[in-house]
Image (cartoon, helix red, strand yellow):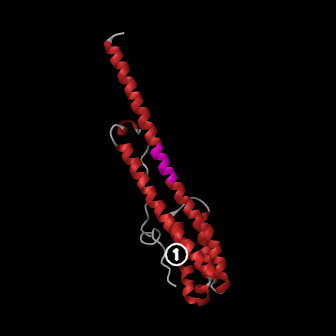
Amino acid sequence: MSVFAMVLIGVIVLVAIMLVGIYNRLVGLRQTVNQGVADIDAQLRQRHDLIPNLVETVKGYAGHEKETLDAVISARNQAANGPISSGDEQGLRVALDRLLALGEAYPDLKASANFQELQRELAHVEDKLAAARRALNAAVSRYNTGRETFPAVLFAGMLGFQPADFHRLDDSEKGTVDQVPKIGF
């Protein structure tokens, strides 16, 4: 076997090892992005699960606030059924704000331990949701950087690794959805 053939085989083996390393690294980074999306979904589901309890607690104190309660239930159902939509989540956030504002009109409701606990839990879920969104954006950044760095950039497209999108708020959500709800009692 000639020296040229051995060098060629060595280069081919080196490129193959490099491709395997690039592929495995990008798979790991892509999985982190997928986990971030799943974490946001889990937090949204937790938020949606808390809402019926909050509504039931408020119903006992604010029976004639049917319109607000129906709006929360409708927004929750719309946001919970189907793919995650920023518009649905914005509608839910607005409905929740209206529901939490009922506490101002009902002093007994403000004093209810159940209402206060549900309110704390909802604020905690909102904190975790904001953290999950930040974690997703960090994972997307690492993935896209890994995909676009040399030499991965030469092979990423061929290996099926497409750029990931950052979690973005649309204009109607900015300043409301990604913040802890303001609770004034």
Residue designated by label 1: 94
Quarter of the image for residue 158 reads: top left
Looking at the picture, how far across and down is residue 52, in whole percent?
Answer: 65, 72
Viewer can see residue 40? yes
Quarter of the image for residue 96 reads: bottom right
Looking at the picture, how far across and down is residue 33, in whole percent?
Answer: 47, 51
Q: Is residue 121 above or below residue 65?
A: above
Q: Is residue 41 above or below residue 74?
A: above
Q: Is residue 50 above or below residue 38?
A: below
| Part of the protein shown in magenta | 28-35
Q: Is residue 10 magenta?
A: no
**Nearer to the camera, 156 or 42:** 42
Left or right of 48 in this view: 22: left
* Mark 1: few/some/many CA within 10 Å (<14, 14-19, 20+): some
Q: Number of numbered discs present?
A: 1
Magenta segment, prevailing SS (helix, strand or loop): helix
Left or right of 162 in this view: 74: right
Residue found at x 33% / y 18% = 7
The amino acid on which the numbered mark 1 sits, given as a three-letter code, is Val
Left or right of 62 in this view: 173: left
Quarter of the image for residue 18 reads: top left
Viewer can see residue 167? no
Residue found at x 59% / y 71% = 75
Looking at the picture, how far across and down is residue 49, in whole percent?
Answer: 62, 67
Looking at the picture, how far across and down is residue 67, in whole percent?
Answer: 62, 81
**Nearer to the camera, 69 or 20:** 20
Residue found at x 49% / y 83% = 184
Q: In the rendered view of the protein, which quadrant contains the N terminus? A: top left
Task: Describe the element under mark 1 as helix, strand or loop.
Answer: helix
Residue found at x 55% / y 72% = 122
Q: Is residue 138 above or below residue 68?
A: above
